[in-house]
Image (cartoon, helix red, strand yellow):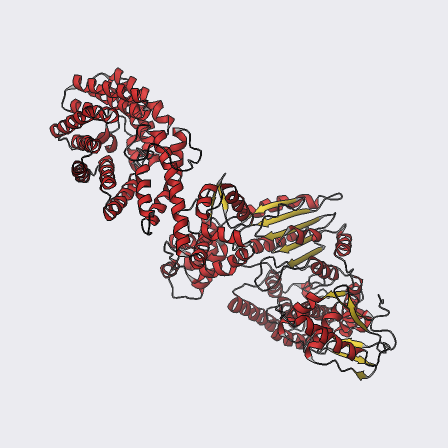
Amino acid sequence: MATLRRVGESEAGSARFGLLGPIEAWHGAERLQLGRRRERALLAVLLLEANKVVSVERVMDLLWDGSPSETARASLRSHVSRLRACLDPAGGNRYGVRLGARGGGYLLETDPGAIDANRFSALVQQARATTDVTSRARQLRAALNLWRGPALADASSDLLRRRLATELDELRLIAIELAVDADLDRGRHEQVVAEVYRLVGDHPYREGLWSRLALALYRAGRQGEALQVLAQARERLSVELGLDPGPELRKLQHRILTADPELSGAEPAVTARSSGLGPPHQVPMDIPEFTGRDLELTALTAMAAPAVQGPGSSPVVCAIEGMAGVGKTRFAIHAAHDLVRRGWFDEVRLWADLHGFDSKLDPADPAAVLGAFLRQLGVPGWEVPEELDARAALYRSQLDGRRALVLLDNAATEEQVRPLLPGSGSSLVLITSRRRLSGLDGVQPFPLDLFTRPETVALLARIAGPERVAGHEEDAARVATLCGYLPMAITLAARRLRAHPTWAFTDLVSRLTVDASGADRPVECRAVGEASFNLSYDALPPQRQRFFRLLGLNPGRQLTARTAAALSGLPLADADAHLESLLDEYLVYESQPGSYRMHDLVLAYARDRALANEPEEAQYAAIQRLLEGYLARATQATLLVHPTESRRVAATVDGETGGLRTTTQAIEWTENNLADLVATVRRAVELPGDAPVLAVRLVLALYRPLANRGHSRERIALNELAAEVAHRIGDRRVQAQVLEDLGALCGQVGRLEDAVRHTEQALAIWRETGNDVGEAGCLTGLGITFRQLERLDEAVVCLREGLAINRRIAHIPGEASALNHLGLALQATGRYDEAITCGKHSIAGYRRLGDRTGEAIALANLGWIYQRSRLPSLAIDCHQAALPLFRDWGDRYNESEQQWGIGQAFHALGEDDQARTHWCEAIRILRDLGVLRPAQAEVLLGQSVPDTPEIIRLNS
C-alpha cells in the first residue's frame, strides 16, 4: 500500500481526486473525464476505501440504493470497464492509478494523499494535536479550503450521498467549530459573528453553533444580541423539535446574565474538548424532557462504579434491554451524561447507532463502526487496518488506560457488539437492545421496565405543562393506562396534548380509548405499534412470526407453554422454546415462573397481524384448541374437588390435564386463570362451529372448583351467557343444568327471587326430560332458597321431596346434600333433634363417598344446628373439624364462616376474648375476598360484639 508523504502532497505524476464537492479528478492542470454519474459514483465508493478490496455486493448495494436489479452485476462490470478506461486511457498507468478485480470485489490502488478527503482528515488531526492557537487556526482553514461544496455533490442518488458522505459532513462541521474556537481564542469576535450567523441558518439545530454565536456577540460587546440569539435557539428547538435547550446553552445564558468575568477572557464558553479538540465526546445531547428512572439510574451508577476504582479496574459492560418504546436509548444517553457529570468518564466518550432494528438500514458492520471510532480517536484514515480483528485490536489499544464511555445503541446481536468492547482499563460500555444479549461474555443485563404511575404523570406534566396536569392527576393516570405505561406512547400523547391548547384531558382520553379488539386504537398507539414492533416482528423467522401472531388471538392475558401450544397447534416443547425466544426479543415478559404476558400494545399488534395474515378458519381453530385444553383441565379440577360429580362433567378427562393432581392445585389453577377463562368463554360463544358448545361445557366444569371462592359476579355472568347459548343451540339438558347452577349462584348473593325463578325453570325442564337426578337437585336448590326466604314450610316440603327421589334412585350424593339442607331447614323451625339426625346422616353419606368437600359443608352446617340448639361446645367441635378441610383446598369463604361460627360458640360460652379472635379473623378474610368493603370491615372490627355479616346470616 502506498504511504502518505507530507500532508497536501501526492506522488509526482499521480492523479488527484476530489470528493469534497463534485466528484472530480485531475492530472496536473488537466481535468479528467470520468464518464457518467454512475461511473463517478463508483469512483467515489472505491476512493473512500482506496487500497482495499470492496466486495461486489457492497458496491451493488451502494450504487443501486440497496435494491440491485437482476442485471446489476453485469452492469457493474460495464461501469468498471468504462471507469478503468477513464483512469488509464492509453495504458501504462500514466496517472498512477490501478483499478482491477480482486478476491470477489474491486481494488483501486492510488496514493492516499491524492484524495482530498484524506488530506482534509489529516489536517484536522494535526490541528487537534497542535497547542499553538494560530497554527491550529491556519491548519483548520487550510483543511476547510479543500471543500468545493457538499461532499459527493453529484453522486448518483441522494441516498448514496447520505450513506457515503455523512461522516465527512460531520467532520467538516467539527472542523468549522474548531476553527471558530481558534478565532475566538485569538479575539477575532466580529469575524466569527459574520461567519456563524450564516452557519446557524444552514444548521439551525446544532446547539454548538448557537452557543459560539452568542459568545462571539457577547465578547464583541453586544450582550443584548447574545441573549436574543439564545432565545431564538430556544424557540427554534422548542417549536420545531419539542425540545428544551441543552445544559451548555442554559449555562451560557446564565453566565452572560451574570457577566461572568471568565467569558471575556481567552477561554471560550464551549471548550476545545467539548467542540471536538482532543479525545472525542460523541454521546448525543441529553433529552431535556427526561423524567423518572431514579431507581434505575442509581442501580446503573452502582453497576458502573467498579470501572473507575483506579489502577487495575476492568471494563464494565451493561446491556440495557427492554421492549420497543420503553425508553432504552433515552435512558442510556441520560445515564451517560449523569456519569460524566460525576467526572467518571471524562476522557473519551464514543457513540454509535448499530441499526439493529432499523427498517431502512442494515445492521451496522462492526468493522465500519470500528473504523469510525478509530478516526474519532485520532487514527488517520490510511492507518486504519482493513481486517476486523486488526481494527478491534487497535481500538482496544487506543482505549487502554483511558477513562472511556462507549454507548452502543440499538444492538442486533452479540456478534455485532463483541468486537466493539474494550479489552482493559477504566471503561464502561452501555449497550441498548430489544434482545437479550446473554451470549456476551461478562455482560451485566439491565432490563428496563414500563413506567410507574407517578413517573407517567410526571412525564405528562413535563411535556404538556404542569398547569395542564394540576388538578387532573386521575385523568393523567387514565392516559397513562391507555398508553400502557409505555414511555414512547406517553410522550406522543403528551405532545399531542401540548399541540392542542384548547383540549382538556378528557378530550385526550376520548381519543385514546381502546376497545377490546383494538380497532379504535389511537394514532399514538398505532404509531408505536407499527413503527416499533414491525422491526422486531420482521426479525423473527417465519415459523416464529406465525407463533407470535397466533398468540395475539388469546382472549385472555396470561400465556403458558400449554396455552401457547394450544393456540399455535405446536407440540408443548416447541411452544415453550418459542416463548423463550420471544422473551429474549422482549415481545413477551415473564410475570411469574412459567407464566408470560404481552404488553397491551404488543398484544394488539399481534392480534392485528393475526387478523391480517391468518385465514378465519385458522383463527377459529386456534380458539377451539384453547377451549379444548381449558375444558380438559377444568374437568380434572372438578373431579379433584368433587369426586362424585357426574352431572356437569364427564367421568373421565378427554385431553391433557396440565399436571393437576391435588385439590389445592385444582382450585389454584381455576382461580389464577379465571379472568382468562371468562374472556375465552365470551370470545368462543361468538364463533361458528363447536366453539359455543365447548364454551358452555367449560362453564359447567367451572362450577365446582369455583364454589365459595368469592367470584359470584363473574360466575353469574358466565352462567347467564351459557344459558343463552344453550337455549340458542337447543340443548335442553345443558340448559337445565346451567339454569339450576344459576339459581344456586343467585341464592348465594341474596338474589333470592331470581334464584327461585331460575331453579323453577330448570326443574320444569328436568321433569319434561324425565331426569330424576336433575329434578331432585332442583328440589334441593329450591329448599335452600325457600329457607333463606324464611318460607320454611315450603323449604321442608321441597327438601323432603328431593330426598325421597334421591333415595328411590339410590343417588347417594343427592341424598347426602338433601339431608344436609333439610337439617338446616328443620332447625330453623325449632325441630332440633330431627335436624341433628339429618346432619349426622349427611356427614356419614359424604364420608361413605369419600367426598371431603361435602363432608366439610355438612360438618359446618351441623355446627350451626348445634349453635341454635344451644349446644355451643358441640358446635365448636363441628366447625373446628370442618376448618382444616376448607383450608386444605383454599376455600376462604367457608373458612371465614367456620371462624365466625367458632366465635359465636365461644361468645355463647362467655369466652369473649377467644370469640373476638375468631370474629376478627373472619372479618379480615371477608374483606380480603371483597365480600366486605374496607369501611364495613373497619366498623365491624371496632365493635365489641360485631354484627353478623349479611352473607353469613344468609348462608349459615
| Residue 648 lies in quadrant | top left
Q: At which x and y percent is residue 335?
A: 60, 52
Residue 742 located left or right of residue 203: left
Q: Considering depth in this image, is 888 or 68 the residue closer to the camera?
A: 68
The residue furthest bottom is: 30
Q: Is residue 88 left or right of residue 680?
A: right
Q: Is residue 371 left or right of residue 890?
A: right
| Residue shown at the point (33%, 51%) measured from the top left | 687
Front residue of 457 and 578: 578
Q: Is residue 160 above or below residue 805?
A: below
User: Looking at the image, which residue is at 21% across and 23% down?
Assistant: 819
User: How far across and down, in percent of the image, does residue 242 sit?
Assistant: 51, 65
Q: Residue furthest left?
A: 793
Indicate whether 506 appears above or below 315: below
Q: Is residue 366 visible?
A: yes
Which residue is pictured at 75% across the width and 43% down the height? 312
Q: Is residue 222 visible?
A: no
Rendered view: 337 above or below 738: below
Residue at image point 37% right, 33% down = 637
Q: Residue 616: image x %, image y %? A: 39, 56
**Screen quadrant of the N terminus:** bottom right
